[in-house]
């Protein structure tokens, strides 16, 4: 993709979910025809080990702002839970996930700070998910239409439909996982397509997740002036009962001291090698829903290039049949898909490509003409 990147290394950091550490914004002022701007890393209102590393990025044209110091570890306050979509009035619609029954889990002072910039957040219910972030369910792709973009949407129903078609083709006994062991990292426990389809937890959680996602799409559609059906791209995903961090391995032999990424709160206790041990799952996530295969919605867009996690789904005739369906949908939306293996580094701990990365946004040419900054 020819995209420059910075790999931030900090051996004592247990939380490498870069997307949850800051929201990329900008400040700009216009003087005549000239625009003077600075990229702003607005750090999240949560306690995550390693967030201080972002101050190393300060320099000409880049500011880092940490307005709040907190011990809070709520997943809702990770900035992967903030996504923006171009609105019809020139302002972005900023979508934030929350639990309607526990709105206090979402930082009122952080959302208040966003509102002070002229942002009117659209809240959607993500409480069904173990991670509870908007970037698991919504994304966008550029389009040549008047609107200029299409909505990418996670579709658990379409994911099950893919497996059902394979079953009807006589492939029900095929293992739904094709990820193989890598060194000390063990392959996932085999589950046949038939077993996944027959699992009542999968069926129930698919219905619950799909209902919540449909409601989020409807709310966003209304806010942006109505999305036509051909502007909504449904990407197959599979969901199941969150296995908690017990599924994040197992690690055997010489690799037992290798560090893992944490998906909640502060640093995990160190082990004998001085590296973070496998953390426990946040208590509120234990019985919620997770993604069975890597989730293609949780990718990174650059122009029309799309960096998506490799699904490692059921292999039929030498090809990943689930990946073929996902790539067909994304390609149909005009995206060139690049796959990256996140199975052991991100997926098994609750995230994928988008969760483990972050990016500064290009300052638009009309910057400085409105007081509303762009949230990424």
Image (cartoon, helix red, strand yellow):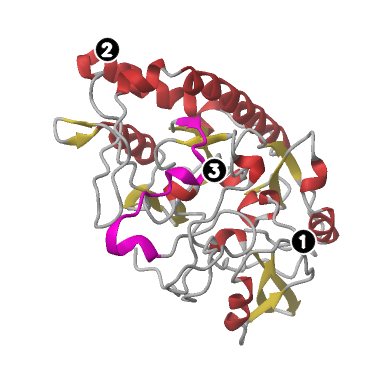
Residue depicted at 39% across the width and 40% down the height:
330
Left or right, 70 with respect to 162, comes to: right
Q: Judge the density around disc 1: few (<14), some (14-19), many (≥20) Cα neighbours within 10 Å.
A: many
Name the element at disc 1.
loop
Q: Judge the density around disc 3: few (<14), some (14-19), many (≥20) Cα neighbours within 10 Å.
A: many
Left or right, 363 with respect to 157, comes to: right
Earlier residue among tags 2 and 1: 2
| Image disc number at residue 136 | 3
Q: Where 2 sits versus 164, above or below?
A: below
- The boundaries of the magenta stretch are 239-258
Residue 213 in the image, given as x and y percentages of width and height: 60, 30
Labelled pair 1, 3 in contact (Cβ < 8 Å): no
Labelled pair 2, 1 in contact (Cβ < 8 Å): no
Which sits in the foreground, 100 or 181? 181
Residue 357 in the image, given as x and y percentages of width and height: 49, 62
* Number of numbered callouts drawn: 3
Labelled pair 2, 3 in contact (Cβ < 8 Å): no
Residue at which label 1 appears:
372
The span from disc 2 to disc 1 (Cα, nearest Å) is 52 Å
Earlier residue among tags 1 and 3: 3
Residue depicted at 59% across the width and 38% down the height:
286
Residue at which label 2 appears:
168
Residue 360 in the image, given as x and y percentages of width and height: 56, 68
Residue depicted at 69% across the width and 49% down the height:
76
The span from disc 1 to disc 3 (Cα, nearest Å) is 26 Å
């Amino acid at each position: 993709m020819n995209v420059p990147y910075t790999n931030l290394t900090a051996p004592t950091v247990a939380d490498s979910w870069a997307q949850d550490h800051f929201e990329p914004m900008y400040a700009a002022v216009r003087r005549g025809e000239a625009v003077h701007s600075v990229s702003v890393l607005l750090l999240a209102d949560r306690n995550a080990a390693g967030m201080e590393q972002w101050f190393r990025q300060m320099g000409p044209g880049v500011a880092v702002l940490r307005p709040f110091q907190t011990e809070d570890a709520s997943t809702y306050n990770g900035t992967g839970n903030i996504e923006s979509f171009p609105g019809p009035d020139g302002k972005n619609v900023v979508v934030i996930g929350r639990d309607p029954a526990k709105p206090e889990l979402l930082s009122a002072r952080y959302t208040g700070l966003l509102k002070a910039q002229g942002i009117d957040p659209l809240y959607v219910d993500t409480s069904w998910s173990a991670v509870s972030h908007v970037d698991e369910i919504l994304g966008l792709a550029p389009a040549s239409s008047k609107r200029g973009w299409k909505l990418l949407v996670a579709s658990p129903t379409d994911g099950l439909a893919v497996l059902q078609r394979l079953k009807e083709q006589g492939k029900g006994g095929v293992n739904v996982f094709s990820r193989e062991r890598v060194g000390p990292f063990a392959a996932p426990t085999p589950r046949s397509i038939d077993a996944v389809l027959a699992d009542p937890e999968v069926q129930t959680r698919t219905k619950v997740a799909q209902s919540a996602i449909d409601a989020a799409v409807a709310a966003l559609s209304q806010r942006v002036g109505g999305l036509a059906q051909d502007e909504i791209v449904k990407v197959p995903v599979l969901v199941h009962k969150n296995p908690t961090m017990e599924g994040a391995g197992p690690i055997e032999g010489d690799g037992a001291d290798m560090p893992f990424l944490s998906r909640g709160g502060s640093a995990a206790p160190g082990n004998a090698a001085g590296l973070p041990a496998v953390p426990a799952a946040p208590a509120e996530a234990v019985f919620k829903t997770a993604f069975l295969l890597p989730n293609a919605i949780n990718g990174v867009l650059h122009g029309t290039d799309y960096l998506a996690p490799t699904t490692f789904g059921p292999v039929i005739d030498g090809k990943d049949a689930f990946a073929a369906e996902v790539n067909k949908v994304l390609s149909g939306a005009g995206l060139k898909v690049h796959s990256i293996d996140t199975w052991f580094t991100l997926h098994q701990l609750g995230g994928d490509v988008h969760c483990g990365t972050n990016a500064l946004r290009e300052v638009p040419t009309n910057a400085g003409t409105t007081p509303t900054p762009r949230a990424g």
